[in-house]
Image: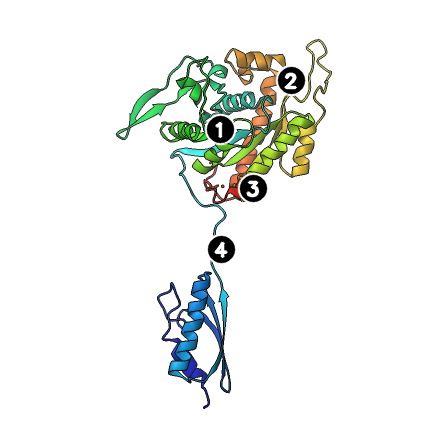
Amino acid sequence: MKIKKEDIIKALQTITVPGEGQNMVESGAVTNVNVFGDEVVVDITIANPSLQAKKKTEVDILKTIHDLVYQKAKIKVNVTVNAPAKPKNEIKGKPIPGIKNIIAVASGKGGVGKSTVTANLAVTLAKMGFNVGVLDADIYGPSMPIMFDVEHEKPLAVNIDGKSKMKPIENYGVKILSIGFFTKPDQAVVWRGPMAAKALNQMIFDAHWDELDFLLLDLPPGTGDIHLSIMQSLPITGAVVVSTPQNVALADAKKGVAMFQQDSINVPVLGIIENMAYFTPAELPDNKYYIFGEAGAKNLAEDLNVPFLGELPLVQSIREAGDVGRPAALQTATPLEKSFETLTQAVVQEVVNRNDNLPPTEAIKITTMAGCSAVKK
């Protein structure tokens, strides 16, 4: 018996591919049919990658051709799977209405001045005319209430569209929320990860931040539970990593950058800030002493191909200003004010570059344990 190609195609029109509504010819699943005497070769592409779907497709083709065309036909079925690629970042959580840019300020190591840098970035942004908020995400060591001289304040409840929301504390033009507002000064926060994450989510989503150009997240040191919880809950615009110049801090800063750059996280790194870069004595204003090493963070930024945002000196008045609750950037007509302005301008420029060149960052969903994703929006 001579088998006709037309008869084979007609027979295949009676079969529906698993998971699709049309028959396999109309859907385009059949990509090729060849007939050589009593031999038939059918090439087909399906989207379902399961072994069961592949086997069912092959069996259906064999049975249909034998039943409707020729019982003794020799049939070969080539099944190709073309499953749509799964997105690396699945959206979980939601943006906060009214907040244009969310900047995570991180450090691989504690004690490098990350919270001090966050506070001074915030007040400098406010001085530039931006609407700014700070979320103190360092659950176990909150410091923003002290740095903004509001440690005895308590957030009030406000009614927004029929829902009770926390009203952030405000000082120096910056809105602040911290777990420190809800604990006693001598009370240690001894919480497991899930409880800390729940507290953070309440401060993020149960607060009335109103309209903000920037929300700065003061993250705890390291690369752990809290960081993943934050990045799962919010679409982070970008991250800033703070380090001092010595090797032990740079090694941890490198891990901090690597955390944000993982495929399963994929948060743009806006750059690295070098804190305590050098010391200049008041009596020798032209001298710089590189106590912790010279240009370590700058060299790290070059090695990792991320922007270097600038350096800050080791100055006693920065520490004193933080201790009394008046960030040093508030001082006018001083070299420190200029340093913080230059640094903040660099951060803003990188945010603009990021928003011009990259899509909005999705809040990420960690899908595997091995995984452990405006100025213009």
User: Looking at the image, which is closer to me, 57 or 167?
Assistant: 57
Which numbered circle lies on residue 262?
A: 3
In the picture of the structure, the residue carrying the numbered disc 4 is 85
Residue depth check, mark 1 versus mark 4: number of the one nearer the observer: 4
Residue sitting at x 27%, y 30%: 161
In the picture of the structure, the residue carrying the numbered disc 1 is 217
x and y, in percent, of residue 129 in the image: 47, 25
Taking the view exactly as shown, the residue that stands out farthest to the top is: 283
> Dot 2, crowdedness within 10 Å: few (<14), some or many (≥20)?
many
> Relative to 39, does residue 361 appear above or below in the rendering?
above
x and y, in percent, of residue 64 in the image: 39, 78
Residue depth check, mark 3 versus mark 2: number of the one nearer the observer: 3
In the picture of the structure, the residue carrying the numbered disc 2 is 314
Residue sitting at x 71%, y 19%: 291
User: Looking at the image, which is closer to me, 171 or 194?
Assistant: 194
What amino acid does circle 3 point to? Gln
- Give the left or right position of residue 257, taking residue 165 as reference: right
What amino acid does circle 2 point to? Leu
Which numbered circle lies on residue 370?
A: none
Chain-order first, disc 2 or disc 1? 1
> Dot 4, crowdedness within 10 Å: few (<14), some or many (≥20)?
few
Chain-order first, disc 3 or disc 2? 3
